[in-house]
Amino acid sequence: MSIPREHCTMCGKEMKPVFNGSEGMKLKGWVCYDGHMFWREAIYRERQYEWSPEWDQPASQRNSVSN
């Protein structure tokens, strides 16, 4: 399952997903680290997404690209 991508409203770059280990590695939200700390919390349906090791790989090394 591919997580939804979010873009920073301040700089437009793709934000990084944040997962909560105390909730079984469920998606907590997204953060932009590029020059500022912008946070967007995941809504209830998005919190059902779980961390996958493939997300640690650069996009060029993944087998498929998701929107």
Image (cartoon, rainbow, N blue to C red):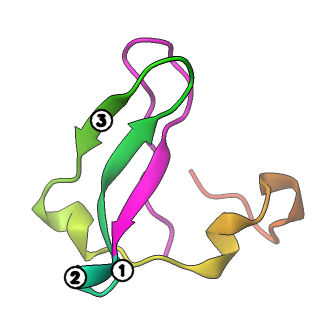
How many numbered tags mark residues here? 3
Judged by its main secondary structure, the magenta piece is loop
In which quadrant of the rendered view does residue 40 lie? top left
| SS label for mark 3 | strand
The stretch of residues the image draws in magenta is 1-20
| Residue 56, percent from left and from top | 68, 66
| SS label for mark 2 | helix
Is residue 54 left or right of 62 when viewed as pictured? left
Q: Amino acid at mark 2?
A: Glu
Q: Judge whether 67 appears above or below 37 on screen.
A: below
Say whether residue 27 is magenta.
no
| Contact, mark 1 vs mark 2 (Cβ under 8 Å) | yes
Residue tagged 2: 23
| Residue 23, percent from left and from top | 22, 82
Quick one: which residue is furthest to the bottom in this view? 24
| SS label for mark 1 | loop
Q: Amino acid at mark 1?
A: Met
Q: Judge whether 10 appears above or below 23 on screen.
A: above
Q: Residues within 10 Å of mark 1 (few under 14, many from 20)?
A: some
Between residue 18 and residue 14, name the one nearer to us: 18
- Cα separation, mark 1 vs mark 2, equals 6 Å
Q: Which mark is residue 25?
A: 1
Between residue 27 and residue 36, name the one nearer to us: 36
Is residue 55 left or right of 47 when viewed as pictured? right
Residue tagged 3: 39
Between residue 4 and residue 32, name the one nearer to us: 32
Q: Which sits earlier in the primary sequence, circle 1 or circle 3?
A: 1
Q: Amino acid at mark 3?
A: Trp
Quick one: which residue is furthest to the top in this view? 10
In which quadrant of the rendered view does residue 58 lie? bottom right
Residue occupying the point 37% across, 46% down: 30
